[in-house]
Image (cartoon, rainbow, N blue to C red):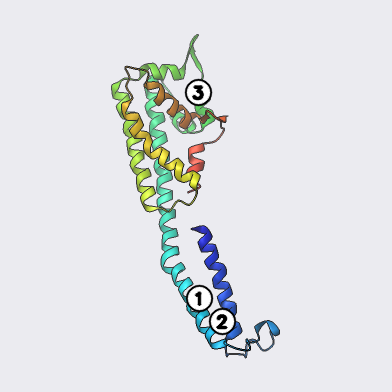
């Protein structure tokens, strides 16, 4: 879509040049040299066609493109805000499950992947990291709360895909992957090894881990959403 818009913009400039070149109003262009001299034949046809095309193109930009751009910016901004809240709620559930006292600003600082990784990689006992403490504390109530957060974010992703044209193929595929996560998580249980699937996903989102690239020092999900 963005290539089409660029093409239309270039075409509109060309049409404007043709309108000026084929116009009968010469007073403004008598001193402009050969470039704006009229064609030898067909000036009226060129003028009418160029005017029609120019009006149609700018009508499209004013009536279609501009409102669509404003709507996309509004939906995108709201979606990114929802992602921030989704991530904050996940962190809140995880920190509360560890049942440790913490400072008021801890949740905000843990929004940074590097800080989250360092905090939950910290050894609480000789053989147990804080992340393992959280996993051992997961019960059915906490699991339902976390899965509900994913379900709510799925609704936000579905709304985004239904109302915004996503031109980037990588981002489009990524959003559909996010949209399908809540479905794949429905089989997660605290009573079997399926909890590992949830653990890997949470660690990927919150600690910035990738099985391909290793740890990232930025929020990969947030960076993808800003490309929408």
- In the picture of the structure, the residue carrying the numbered disc 1 is 54
Q: Up-down: is 192 above or below 83?
A: above
Question: Could you give the CA–CA distance between mark 3 and mark 2, rounded to whole angstroms?
Answer: 66 Å
Seen at 55% across and 70% down, the residue is 11
Q: Name the side, left or right, on which 138 lies relative to 70.
A: left
Badge 2: residue crowd in 10 Å (few <14, some 14–19, many ≥20): many
Q: Up-down: is 43 above or below 103?
A: below
- In the picture of the structure, the residue carrying the numbered disc 3 is 119
Q: Is residue 100 visible?
A: no
- The image quarter in which residue 85 lies: top left
> Which mark sits nearer the N-terminus, 2 or 1?
2
> What secondary structure is found at the residue carrying circle 3?
helix
Assess whether mark 1 and mark 2 are in contact (beta carbons under 8 angstroms): yes
Residue 121 at x, y percent in the picture: 51, 20
Question: Could you give the CA–CA distance between mark 1 and mark 3, rounded to whole angstroms?
Answer: 59 Å
Seen at 35% across and 39% down, the residue is 154
* Foreground of the two, 22 or 160: 22
Closer to the observer: label 1 or label 3? 1
* Foreground of the two, 192 or 129: 192
Q: Up-down: is 4 above or below 205?
A: below
Seen at 38% across and 33% down, the residue is 89
Residue 3 at x, y percent in the picture: 53, 59
Residue 12 at x, y percent in the picture: 54, 72
Q: Which mark is residue 19?
A: 2
Residue 149 at x, y percent in the picture: 34, 34
> Which mark sits nearer the N-terminus, 1 or 3?
1
Q: How many marks?
A: 3
Q: Is residue 42 visible?
A: yes
Seen at 59% across and 82% down, the residue is 20
Closer to the observer: label 3 or label 2? 2
């Amino acid at each position: 879509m963005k290539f089409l818009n660029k093409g239309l913009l270039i075409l509109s400039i060309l049409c404007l040049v043709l309108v000026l070149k084929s116009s009968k109003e010469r007073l403004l262009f008598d001193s402009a040299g050969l470039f704006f001299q009229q064609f030898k034949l067909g000036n009226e046809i060129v003028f009418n066609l160029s005017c029609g095309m120019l009006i149609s193109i700018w009508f499209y930009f004013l009536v279609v493109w501009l409102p669509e751009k404003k709507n996309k910016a509004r939906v995108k901004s709201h979606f990114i805000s929802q992602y921030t809240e989704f991530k904050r709620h996940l962190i809140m559930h995880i920190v509360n499950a560890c049942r440790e006292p913490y400072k008021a600003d801890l949740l905000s600082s843990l929004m940074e992947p590097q800080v989250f990784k360092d905090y939950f990689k910290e050894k609480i006992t000789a053989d147990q990291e804080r992340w393992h403490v959280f996993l051992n504390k997961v019960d059915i109530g906490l699991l339902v709360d976390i899965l509900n957060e994913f379900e709510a974010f799925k609704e936000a992703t579905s709304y985004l895909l239904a109302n915004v044209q996503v031109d980037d193929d990588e981002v489009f595929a990524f959003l559909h992957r996010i949209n399908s996560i809540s479905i794949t998580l429905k089989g997660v249980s605290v009573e079997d090894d399926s909890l590992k699937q949830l653990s890997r996903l949470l660690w990927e989102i919150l600690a910035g881990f990738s099985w391909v690239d290793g740890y990232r020092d930025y929020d990969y999900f947030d960076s993808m959403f800003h490309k929408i």
